[in-house]
Each structure stands twice: as C-alpha cells, then as structure tokens.
Image (cartoon, rainbow, N blue to C red):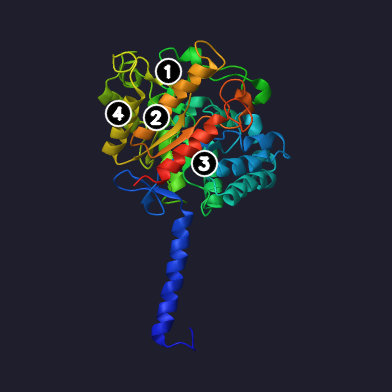
C-alpha cells in the first residue's frame, strides 16, 4: 500500500489513519449517556447550562431573510453559554408548508442554522415536533393517532426524523435529539375537554376538536418508542429526550385512577421513568416556581427536593437527567415584580448549581413573543441573566 515504507511502518500508518477516522466519528457524535446515567462529552462528564432559543429556526420560516440567529449564537458563545434547545420544525402546520412544497429551500435554511451554530461553537438540542397537535393536524388525523404506529402521523414523524438525523448526525453542533415539548402535561386529564388543542384555522388547525384529540400516557409512550427507534436507526449514540416537563403533582394517580390525589416521591419517580421508555436515555423535566406547589401532600417543596427526586429516578433507570427548561416566573404579572422574579430566579439557579444535575437550559433567550414577560436579550432589563449564566458555566467547567 505504501511501497516506500516497510510493512511495519505501513501498518502503523494504516492504524493511525483508522484511529483518526474513528476519533473524528466519535467527536461528531456529540454527547452520550453511559450505563450509569452519566452524560459524557468527549468521554468525560459534562456540566453545562444552556438556553432555550426556541424560535432560532422558526423565525426564518416566517421570513427567509431573517438570520438573526447568527448574531444570537455569537452572543451566546461570547457569554460562555455552550448549547441551545430549539424548535427544529414549524410550530403550527403553516410553518411546515416549506417542508412540504419546497424541501430543498426548507433544508437550506435549517442547514444555515446548523452551520451558524458550528461556526460559533454552540451546541444544539433540537426538538423536532414541538406542539403535540401539529403533525396530526398536518396529515388530517386527531391527536390520539400518536398512539397508532400505523397512522399517517407516525409515517410523517418517521420520515422527518430519518431525513433530519441523517442530514445532521455528523455535525459536531448536535448534542442530543428531542421529540417534542411537554406532551406529558396533556395526558390522562379528567377534564381533557377543557384542554384540547387550539383551533387556529388560519394557521392550519381544524375548526373543531373532539375526544379523539385527548391523549393518554400510553399513546405518548408509543410515539416516543417509535421516535427513539427511528433516531437510533441512524444515530446510535447521541442522547434522546422526550422533552417532557416535570410530571404533574398527580400524574401517577391520574394515569392509574383518574384522580387528583398527590403523588408520593416514589410515584413521581416511577412516572418519570414510565414516561421515558427505552431507547430514550435522557429523563426530561421542566421546572418553574409553580412546579413546587401541591407536591407529595406537603404543599410547597424546595427546588432542591425536585432536582433530587428527578436525579434519583434517572439513577435508578440508568438514564441521564436533562432540565430542559428552568427559569424565573414572568416579571410582568402579579404576584411577581421585576425584583421578586429575579430573586426567585436566583434561588432556582442556586438550587440547580448545588444539585447533581449535569445538563440544563434556561428559559428563554431572544423570544419576541415573551419579550414582556420572560425573554432575555443583551439589551433588555433581563440582560443580567446572561452574565449569571456565564459565571455559572465557568464554575461548572472547573467542576471535577
């Protein structure tokens, strides 16, 4: 093969080349979860706090000229914020029109988002199917078809997963894959009729909803398993998250008996594991101030308790833990003020940093829809959170 080298030297060169290719492949696989539930990056435990940059991609679906995410990624990198969680598709059906009618154009925009993240050195945790009713609405099915592996909803989901994961699996920007956003909050509700999906016809939703739009835990589990298997068929290593919020205070009792009886700590842990079926390997929770209320029959509990319960559930299942959303309450609505909301956010951050949580994402960066309530930018009155996150990540980087 290399006539100017002896066989020994040739073998060494060949082995070195194969090792280099292998190392590049491993590096491109981003994070992984080991058998003990530790989240690893480049073979070592990673501790990082990112942000939710929810509409970094969807903004350019509405306006192809909007590439403000490039400036956003650069700003986050300058503040040592290592990754973002974002919506990797449309929110309403209208947001998927480009994918359906001009797939090349759609993916060229998504390509640029991924490329911009790579150039800035910012990781991505893409959530592929953010709103639970969107894909069923696109294919003309009710929402409960998430529970039917033979449905059009599943067929659409699997096609998109295969295309997206195949396209970006070698990008060093991709840290993990996620199914959607907080599907678990919509399941097993005795008053489901009062909480059916919106009917925004002008955005592609149907004019009416009915019982077939109600979700049960098992339906979501069926969808999650199919999603995970579709991801694993292409990407065997990167972590997979459901995108769930912290379980409702009565989630176990709602599933088992349809009652609002508060769950115990053990029942909360069981529900977190139940709603994160294999091959998913990241238990996802979202934590806000209201999440502490009506827990375990004890009233209001501490953030520390919630993080510990979730970590214990993850440890018992050999899965990682991802706090996919956390943050202060809206600071424009009673009973909160700017000052009290900031203080609450600081308490939550302190609890998170003192916990065994490895991966978390602050809600929310540069989200115009919540500019009045929660969005953090470099120029608004919440800009101090960027510095707080920078300080936190510098401290975490030194964590043994």
- Horizontal and vertical percent for residue 346? 44, 26
Q: Is residue 123 above or below residue 250?
A: below
List the residue tagged with mark 1: 290
- Residue 163 lies, in percent from the top left, at 56, 47
Q: If you read the primary sequence from the N terminus, does the residue marked by circle 3 or circle 2 appear first?
A: 3
Q: Are marks 2 and 1 in contact (CB under 8 Å)?
A: no
Q: Secondary structure at mark 2?
A: helix
Please identify, in this view, whether the residue under mark 3 or under mark 1 is nearer the observer: 3
Helix, strand or loop status at disc 1 = helix
Residue 194 percent across, percent down from the top left? 49, 12
Tag in front: 2 or 1? 2
Residue reaching furthest top? 334
Q: Mark 4 = which residue?
A: 269
Q: Would you say 36 lies left or right of 341 here?
A: left
Q: Does any portion of residue 215 appear in the rendered image?
A: no
Q: Mark 3 packing: few (<14 Cα in 10 Å), some, or many (20+)?
A: many
Residue carrying label 3: 81
If you read the primary sequence from the N terminus, does the residue marked by circle 3 or circle 4 appear first?
3
Q: Which residue is mark 2?
A: 350
Q: Do residues under tags 4 and 2 come within 8 Å of each other at their CB atoms?
A: no
């Amino acid at each position: 093969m290399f006539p100017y080298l002896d066989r020994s030297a040739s073998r060494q060169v060949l082995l070195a080349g194969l090792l280099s290719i292998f190392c590049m492949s491993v590096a491109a696989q981003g994070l992984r979860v080991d058998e003990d539930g530790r989240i690893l990056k480049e073979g070592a435990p990673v501790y990082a706090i990112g942000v939710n940059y929810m509409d970094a991609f969807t903004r350019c679906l509405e306006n192809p000229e909007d590439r403000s995410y490039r400036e956003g990624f650069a700003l986050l990198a300058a503040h040592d914020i290592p990754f973002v969680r974002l919506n990797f598709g449309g929110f309403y059906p209208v947001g998927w029109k480009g994918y359906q009618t001009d797939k090349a154009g759609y993916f060229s925009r998504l390509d640029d988002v991924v490329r911009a993240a790579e150039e800035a050195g910012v990781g991505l945790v893409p959530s592929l199917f953010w709103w639970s009713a969107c894909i069923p609405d696109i294919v003309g099915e009710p929402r409960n078809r998430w529970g039917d592996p033979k449905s059009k909803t599943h067929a659409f989901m699997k096609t998109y997963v295969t295309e997206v994961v195949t396209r970006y699996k070698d990008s060093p920007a991709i840290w993990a894959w996620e199914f959607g956003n907080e599907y678990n909050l919509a399941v097993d509700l005795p008053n489901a009729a009062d909480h059916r999906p919106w009917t925004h016809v002008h955005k592609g939703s149907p004019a009416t909803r009915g019982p077939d739009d109600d979700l049960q835990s098992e339906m979501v589990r069926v969808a999650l398993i199919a999603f995970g298997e579709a991801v694993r068929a292409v990407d065997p290593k990167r972590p997979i998250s459901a995108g769930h919020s912290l379980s409702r205070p009565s989630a176990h009792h709602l599933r088992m008996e349809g009652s609002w009886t508060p769950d115990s700590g053990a029942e909360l842990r069981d529900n977190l594991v139940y709603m994160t079926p294999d091959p998913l390997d990241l238990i996802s929770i979202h934590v806000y101030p209201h999440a502490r209320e009506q827990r375990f029959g004890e009233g209001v509990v501490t953030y520390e308790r919630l993080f510990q319960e979730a970590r214990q559930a993850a440890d018992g299942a050999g899965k990682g833990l991802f706090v996919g959303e956390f943050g202060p309450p809206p600071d424009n609505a009673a009973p909160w003020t700017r000052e009290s909301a900031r203080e609450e956010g600081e308490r939550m951050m302190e609890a998170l940093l003192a916990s065994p949580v490895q991966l978390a994402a602050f809600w929310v960066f540069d989200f115009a829809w919540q500019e009045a309530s929660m969005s953090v930018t470099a120029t608004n009155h919440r800009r101090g959170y960027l510095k707080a996150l920078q300080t936190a990540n510098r401290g975490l980087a030194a964590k043994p």
